[in-house]
């Protein structure tokens, strides 16, 4: 396909567009500059950001220039979209640390060399704004009545929406306006939950600059039941290997529901659609082969081929009864921790998110030590549990961990 719009439609990315025919024509005949915003509230992106990164990567493959906008300025306020409570305020130092981590992860998907893509921080223009000038020049173009109908504000009105957060839409709209003036950016892409904010920026450019501007949203990553994917017992599925190990990341995709495999292959890999459809059509036990392909391809994109192979080999060794445990996630403990409650060790190794969850798992038969179910919530880890220098923990049906003494 010569038009990225057709590719994005075929793979299931596009949810809403402001001017579908104009956008398709524009993307087919010109190389445009577009942007997606990333909120630097943490030093790692998670699976919720994954589709946006793939969206950008497909656009860049067709010659369009991405701007990755990190919200160093807007993070000082916080986006109320989808939130029922006000966000925690971050310091400038925290935001700068988070921005550095985000750029590193984006670089796996986007080529920033030779001006092929740009990383921009909206703190560069937002933090030095003159408030009176901003309200006169920008605020005049926003209708409060219309803003109050936006979904991102509706949810907060009952609990209380601060004026600080009410400014967020103006600031995000202003971002698009600034990127248009500075870099010729004509399109904003983002998650479907950002639709109201995206329209605000597009309309601001059209009113103030008398120029064409556009917006497209991508579908949010949900399973067949409509629930957001990427949530685990331990929280979000992070792209940072220190927060979610490549093995756990691989295992998440290896265990997705049968009905979600084709969608995930289309959205989260670069496999040709013929192959995506072939794998997605597999039934019963054969669908596991498609899940292995999905897990490997997604892990390769996020963590690199070497880590993907290690995760794959570890999973194959465990499920085929093989002996190679070298790539299984490892919990290192000191010798003085022998004799400690097993749940304390699992908590410190982030195998369980809390002692309460650990007790629940034990009571339901969900924890095994060296292939024997743990039945006592007060079980102690002893020297006898270490065979060939390690103790093997199994959580649930498919998650394995190795405990070794440093």
Image: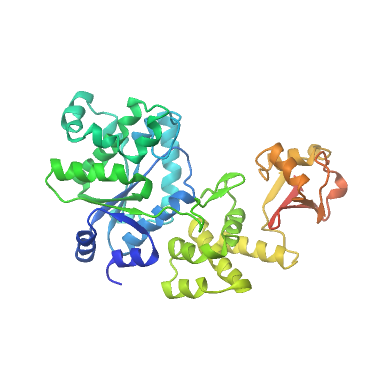
By what rule are the colours in the image chosen? rainbow
Q: Residue 75, percent across and down?
A: 38, 34
307 with respect to 321 (left or right):
left
Q: How many labels does the image show?
A: 0
Q: In the orientation shown, which residue stands out farthest toward the top?
A: 132
Q: Is residue 405 visible from the viewing direction of this image?
A: no
Residue under the image location 57 percent in, 61 percent down: 257
Q: Which residue is more in the foreground, 143 or 68?
A: 143
In the rendered image, the vertical position of residue 233 relative to residue 286, given as above or below? above
Q: Which quadrant of the view contains residue 77?
A: top left
Q: In the orientation shown, which residue stands out farthest toward the left?
A: 210
Q: Is residue 397 visible from the viewing direction of this image?
A: yes
Q: Which residue is more in the foreground, 259 or 351?
A: 259
Q: Residue 125, percent across and down?
A: 26, 34
Q: Residue 372, percent across and down?
A: 83, 54
* Quadrant position of the N terminus in the picture: bottom left
Residue under the image location 29 percent in, 39 percent down: 172
244 with respect to 366 (left or right):
left
* Quadrant position of the C terminus in the picture: top right
Q: Which residue is more in the foreground, 73 or 86?
A: 86
Q: In the orientation shown, which residue stands out farthest toward the right?
A: 384
Q: Which quadrant of the view contains residue 270?
A: bottom left
317 with respect to 260 (left or right):
right
């Amino acid at each position: 396909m010569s038009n990225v719009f057709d590719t994005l439609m075929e793979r299931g990315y596009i949810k809403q567009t402001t001017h579908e025919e104009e956008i398709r024509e524009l993307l087919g005949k010109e190389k445009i500059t577009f942007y997606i915003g990333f909120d630097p509230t943490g030093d790692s992106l998670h699976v919720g950001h994954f589709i946006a990164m793939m969206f950008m990567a497909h656009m860049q493959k067709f010659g369009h220039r991405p701007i990755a906008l990190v919200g160093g300025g807007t993070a000082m306020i916080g986006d109320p979209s989808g939130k029922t409570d006000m966000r925690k305020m971050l310091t400038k130092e925290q935001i700068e640390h988070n921005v550095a981590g985000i750029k590193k992860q984006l670089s796996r998907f986007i080529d920033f060399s030779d001006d092929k893509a740009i990383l921009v921080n909206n703190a560069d223009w937002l933090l030095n704004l003159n408030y009176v000038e901003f309200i006169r020049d920008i605020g005049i173009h926003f209708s409060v009545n219309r803003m109050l109908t936006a979904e991102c504000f509706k949810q907060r009105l009952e609990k209380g929406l601060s004026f600080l957060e009410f400014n967020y839409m103006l600031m995000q709209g202003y971002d698009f306006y600034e990127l248009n003036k500075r870099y010729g950016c004509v399109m904003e892409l983002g998650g479907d939950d950002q639709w109201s904010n995206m329209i605000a920026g597009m309309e601001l450019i059209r009113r103030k600059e008398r120029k064409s501007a556009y917006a497209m949203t991508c579908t949010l990553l949900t399973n067949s039941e409509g629930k957001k994917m990427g949530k685990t017992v331990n929280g979000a599925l992070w792209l940072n290997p220190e927060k979610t190990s490549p093995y756990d990341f691989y295992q998440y995709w290896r265990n997705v529901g049968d009905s979600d495999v084709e969608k995930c292959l289309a959205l989260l890999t670069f496999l040709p659609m013929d192959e995506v459809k072939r794998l997605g059509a597999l039934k019963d036990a054969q669908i596991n082969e498609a899940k292995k392909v999905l897990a490997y391809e997604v892990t390769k994109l996020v963590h690199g081929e070497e880590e993907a192979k290690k995760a794959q080999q570890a999973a194959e060794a465990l499920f085929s009864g093989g002996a190679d445990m070298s790539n299984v996630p490892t919990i290192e403990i000191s010798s003085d921790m022998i004799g400690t409650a097993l749940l304390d060790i699992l908590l410190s190794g982030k195998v369980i998110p809390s002692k309460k969850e650990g007790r629940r798992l034990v009571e339901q038969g969900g924890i095994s030590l060296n292939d024997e179910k743990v039945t006592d919530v007060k079980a102690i880890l002893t020297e006898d549990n270490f065979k060939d220098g390690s103790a093997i923990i199994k959580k649930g049906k498919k998650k394995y961990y190795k405990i070794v003494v440093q």
